[in-house]
């Protein structure tokens, strides 16, 4: 059996966040991030916050950084649009910002309503000056999230990791 | 309801009087920013020049990162109306070191005093709102210690509630509509952030 394949990539992300001393994790309910969110909720070192909208994640991260803590925002591509205005804070305040985004409307998506924001996600993030990393396969996840965390917390950048739908799997609502 | 009589500038000055290194203040954009700055600009103030809807969530992130410090968010009704959900997010965490003071003049001050939804209903063609009660919304979100302040006689207790009462605390203060001098802090956001972290953590 392939050793890499036996380790779940959600667990690898959790380990990487711990390695980087991330202390606050923000999320809305999400199937793609589900296993990671549960690991964070069970952790003693990480404070996990459920948000009413992804937008709250940007000022939360700014406040955490003001207080000396690192954070990460977990969201779906459909939530990215909610963050765009306040994403400007990462430029005006110049604070490290890391977000991990599970993509929808990306690769074999069943739900047509997911396509506009899914397809727009890289463009609007780029327009706001957010550095983009993209992951298509499980064996790239750990190294990519680690690199993104370094760019954010050491390099002072706003960084988004796009976890592509090819990696996450296609939600098909029971259709074959 | 009788007209508001409290004036925001002397009120904020009283709230911040004698602020030491234990008090971390976030001021919402516009009037609240000028108010906290008029009370005395200090490194542990984070005055916002934009980012409408951000202060409460910012205060929450800070309060959780610094549980031994008091975090005070001072902002206006227009800003608060833009981020009502953040009150539920605060309630879910119950930070005992966070106080939120909303100065409610029922107007969007920076854009020409248009009515916000906290203005009364049936208040004429251009000044009508919805009579929105932000203190009731905060309570409904799960911030049980939530109240409205209207009278000069309540200010001493307000100062105590903003500074030391166990959080999360939400106070809605009805204030007069006034034309006041702009008292501006430094504008550069990275500088404001760096001086705050330098003062709090000893490193930018």
Image (spheres, rainbow, N blue to C red):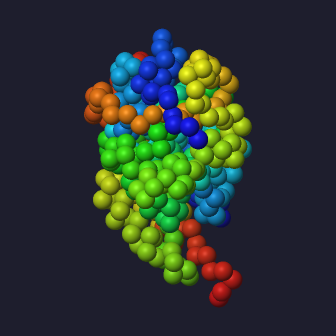
Coordinates of residue A168 in the picture (x, y in percent): 57, 68
Instruction: State the residue in front, B184 or A153.
Output: B184
Determine the residue positioned at 51% across, 78% down: A113
* Quadrant, the C terminus of chain A: bottom right
Coordinates of residue A169 in the picture (x, y in percent): 58, 72
Coordinates of residue B114 in the picture (x, y in percent): 39, 50
Spot the residue most to the bottom: A176
Identify the image quadrant of residue A31. bottom right
Q: Is residue B9 left or right of residue A23?
A: left
Determine the residue positioned at 53% across, 68% down: A167
* Quadrant, the N terminus of chain A: bottom right
Instruction: State the residue in front, A74 or B82.
Output: B82
Identify the image quadrant of residue B90. top right
User: Can residue B171 be seen in the rendering of this structure?
Assistant: no
Instruction: State the residue in front, A44 or B96.
Output: B96
Instruction: State the residue in front, B195 or B47.
Output: B47
Above or below for A41 versus B151: below
Above or below for A119 versus B138: below
Determine the residue positioned at 44% across, 52% down: B127
Coordinates of residue B122 in the picture (x, y in percent): 52, 56
Determine the residue positioned at 45% across, 55% down: B124
Count how many numbered circles sit on residues in the image.
Answer: 0
């Amino acid at each position: 059996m392939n050793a890499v394949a036996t380790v779940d990539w959600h667990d690898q992300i959790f380990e990487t966040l711990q390695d980087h001393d991330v202390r606050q994790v923000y999320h809305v309910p999400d199937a793609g991030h589900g296993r990671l969110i549960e690991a964070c909720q069970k952790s003693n070192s990480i404070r996990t916050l459920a948000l009413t909208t992804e937008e709250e994640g940007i000022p939360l991260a700014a406040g955490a950084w003001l207080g000396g803590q690192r954070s990460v925002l977990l969201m779906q591509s459909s939530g990215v649009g909610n963050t765009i205005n306040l994403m400007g804070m990462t430029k005006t305040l110049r604070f490290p910002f890391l977000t991990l985004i599970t993509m929808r409307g990306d690769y074999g998506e069943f739900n047509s309503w997911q396509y506009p924001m899914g397809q727009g996600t890289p463009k609007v993030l780029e327009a706001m000056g957010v550095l983009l990393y993209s992951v298509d396969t499980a064996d790239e996840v750990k190294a990519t999230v680690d690199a993104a965390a370094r760019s954010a917390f050491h390099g002072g950048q706003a960084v988004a990791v796009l976890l592509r739908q090819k990696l996450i799997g296609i939600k098909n609502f029971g259709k074959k | 309801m009788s007209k508001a009589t409290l004036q925001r500038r002397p009120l904020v000055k009283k709230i911040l009087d004698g602020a030491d290194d234990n008090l971390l203040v976030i001021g919402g954009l516009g009037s609240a920013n000028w108010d906290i700055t008029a009370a005395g600009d200090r490194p542990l103030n984070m005055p916002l020049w934009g980012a409408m809807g951000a202060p409460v969530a910012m205060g929450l992130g800070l309060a959780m990162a610094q549980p031994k410090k008091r975090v005070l968010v001072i902002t206006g009704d227009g800003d608060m109306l833009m981020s009502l959900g953040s009150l539920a997010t605060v309630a879910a965490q119950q930070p005992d070191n966070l106080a939120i003071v909303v100065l409610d003049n029922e107007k969007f001050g920076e854009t020409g005093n248009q009515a916000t939804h906290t203005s009364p209903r049936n208040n004429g063609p251009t000044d009508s709102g919805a009579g929105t009660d932000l203190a009731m919304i905060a309570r409904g979100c799960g911030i049980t210690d939530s109240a409205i302040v209207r009278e000069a006689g309540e200010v001493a207790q307000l100062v105590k509630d903003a500074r030391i009462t166990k959080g999360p605390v939400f106070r809605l203060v009805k204030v007069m509509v006034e034309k006041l001098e702009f008292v501006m802090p430094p504008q550069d956001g990275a500088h404001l952030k760096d001086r705050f972290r330098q003062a709090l953590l000893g490193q930018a």
